[in-house]
Amino acid sequence: MNKILSILFALLFLVGILAACTGTSAPEVAAPVSTEMPVLEEIPEPEETLPSATGVTSANVQVRLATEALLSHFGSYDEFVEFDGGGHQRIAITTETRILDFSFVELKFDESSSSAIPFSLHYQEQLQPETPFVVTWAHQGTTPHRGILFTDEENQQRLFSIRQSDDGGTLVLDEIEIHAPTALPGTATTGILIDPERVWESITVSSGFSDDPHVLSAEAALQVFEILSTMEAEELLEPYPNQSQQSEPLFVISITFVDGGTEEILSTETGLDFFRFTGTYGPHGDRGYVGGESGVLFEILMAYL
């Protein structure tokens, strides 16, 4: 009997084990599908950089096409339109440090073509890093016909031609020697007024930097007229570019005569040299003038500015 019970319990234990091995697990429930769009992480745009260009001086003056993308990096720019109408590109001259006496020039090469005479088409006292110079550009032939002239950080005058690269893909600045013909001798003269015998009625002075005119006192006007009539001067009727007067005047003297006529005398930016234009021109379009120097005149006029 005990043997039969032992066999029965063994069978029941074996059935329990088999039931456990063949049991099914609960089915997995799929996660609900979201209908919301995923939020993409914002990837910052790469910082914009200026188009590359070839540095040519210690001031790193460069020339590029004046695209909207380039000009958007600057708050403002100076512009000179040489060619009207469509079909012309615009180029931008930029610098990393301030340069002085900047001119956009026409180039006239001498016979050897190793140096050129610069003829100024546009002049400004300086070119600043934050304010590019933009000009219309027309490629003409293989010989450069336009360039830039300026004074660099070492106070050296530099002349560069502007040309397209050999593959036509970029613009290039090439430094060239300035061909300075022997300066024409000026004619010594006394005074810079057209007719010192005319009787003046009033004299005013203003600044070339848009200052309002100031009427000189009778005493000061008399001194000014006397100096302008008797100062040692030199007359250059047909100057070369290196002899021309191009700077913004510090003083503009306006003389009104009793007969109703007027005469204007200008100074250089230093205010020490005074001149008037003669109405004549040099071989490259530079205006003729007669001028002289006077520190006394400078002191008188400075009291009114």
Image (cartoon, rainbow, N blue to C red):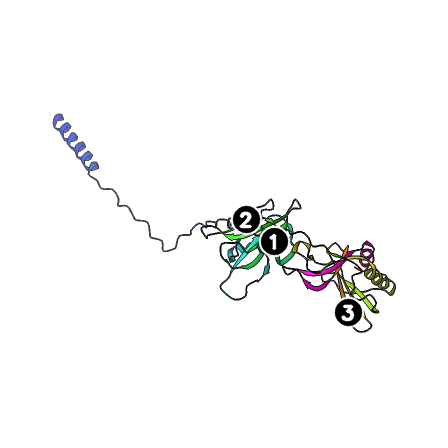
| Mark 2 or mark 3: whose residue is earlier in sequence | 2
- How many C-alpha atoms fall within 10 Å of the one at disc 1: few (<14), some, or many (≥20)? many
Looking at the figure, which quarter contains the N terminus? top left
Give the residues drawn in magenta, as a range: 277-300
* Left or right of 197 on screen, residue 6: left
Q: Earlier in the sequence, mark 1 or mark 3?
A: 1
Against 87, residue 296 (above or below) is above
**Can I make out residue 226 in this image?**
yes
Q: Name the residue under label 2.
A: 174
Q: Is residue 18 above or below residue 229?
A: above
Amino acid found under the numbered disc labelled 1? Ile
Q: In which quarter of the image is the C terminus?
A: bottom right
The mark found on residue 262 in the picture is: 3
Dot 3: element: strand
Q: In this view, does 55 lie to the left or right of 229?
A: left
Q: Which of the pair 174/15 is nearer the observer? A: 174
Q: How crowded is mark 3: few (under 14 residues within 10 Å), some or many (20 or more)?
A: some
Residue 264 on image: x %, y %: 75, 65
**Under tag 2, what secondary structure?**
strand
Q: Label 1, on which residue?
A: 117
Residue 25 % position (x, y): 25, 42
